[in-house]
Amino acid sequence: MPAEEILISQARIESRLPELAAEINEALPEGPVHVVMILKGAIVFGVDLARALGRNTTLGFLSASSYGAGMKSKGRVEIDARHLGEVEGRNVLLIDDILDTGHTFSKTIDILRDKRPASLRTCVLMDKPERREVDIHADHVGFAIENHFVVGYGLDCDEAYRTLPDIRIYAPE
Ligand code: PRP
């Protein structure tokens, strides 16, 4: 199988989740939180993290599509916000699985800020800082990683591997 090498084990993910939740709870104002996940990659991590917060949470979703030559986003990102939910005046936590070039996260943050939340915190499971094309960071980062193509725990290759319990390096045979 082309995704055998485990980069981040299930045990490491499980022990990082409560640490991240504690960091975020400390940074967020008290009270309910609207948790926004970017489909589809953030779903697995986002639900686990939302539960680890142990707060009154509501869920919202954004869907991002990238356009341009080549496989990945070249800066043209279109966001579908039909399932975002109410943001104005609320404490919002934006969650994604991976921060790569930064185009998706940057566009998403702009859209959320335009809707005037009471506060906005951002969290990504993984950060690949060396790939960045936009000057942006996440407030909370699960793991900083090198420039590997990773799958599992929400991340896919052609829609496969999203439900693996750990994060693996994808290496085609
Ligand atoms: C991935 C990932 C991030 C985005 C990061 O989504 O989930 O949302 O790319 O890339 P960027 O920082 O270069 O913009 P993808 O387009 O693969 O969709 P998916 O989440 O549905 O797998």
Image (tube, rainbow, N blue to C red):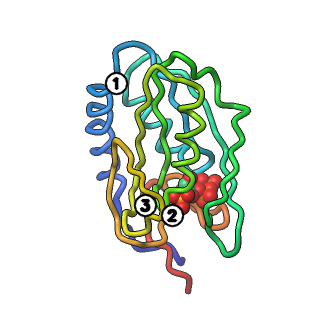
Answer yes or no: do the residues labelled 3 and 2 have beta carbons within 8 Å?
Answer: yes
Mark 2 — residue?
Answer: 151
Q: Answer yes or no: do the residues labelled 1 and 2 have beta carbons within 8 Å?
A: no
Dot placed on the residue nearer the N-terminal end, 1 or 2: 1
The quarter holding residue 50 reads: top left
Q: Which residue is at a point 40% across and 19% down the rendered structure image?
A: 55
Give the residue drawn at x 58%, y 47%: 107
The label shown at residue 114 is none
Question: Which is in the foreground here, disc 1 or disc 2?
Answer: 1
- The residue wearing badge 1 is 28
Q: Is mark 1 within 8 Å of ligand 1?
A: no
Instruction: Please name the amino acid that badge 3 sits on.
Output: Ile
Q: Which residue was labeled with disc 3?
A: 167
Labels 3, 1: front one: 1
Q: Is residue 7 left or right of residue 32?
A: left
Comparing 8 with 100, the one in front is: 100
Asked if residue 162 shows in the view, the reply is no
**Distance between mark 3 and mark 1 Cα atoms:** 28 Å
Amino acid residing under circle 2: Val
Residue type at mark 1 is Leu
Q: Is residue 53 left or right of residue 149?
A: left
Q: Residues within 10 Å of mark 1 (few under 14, many from 20)?
A: some
Within 10 Å of disc 2 (Cα), the crowding (few <14, some 14-19, many 20+) is many
Whichever of labels 3 and 1 marks the residue nearer the N terminus, that label is: 1
Where residue 145 appears, as percent x and y from the top left, is 34, 64
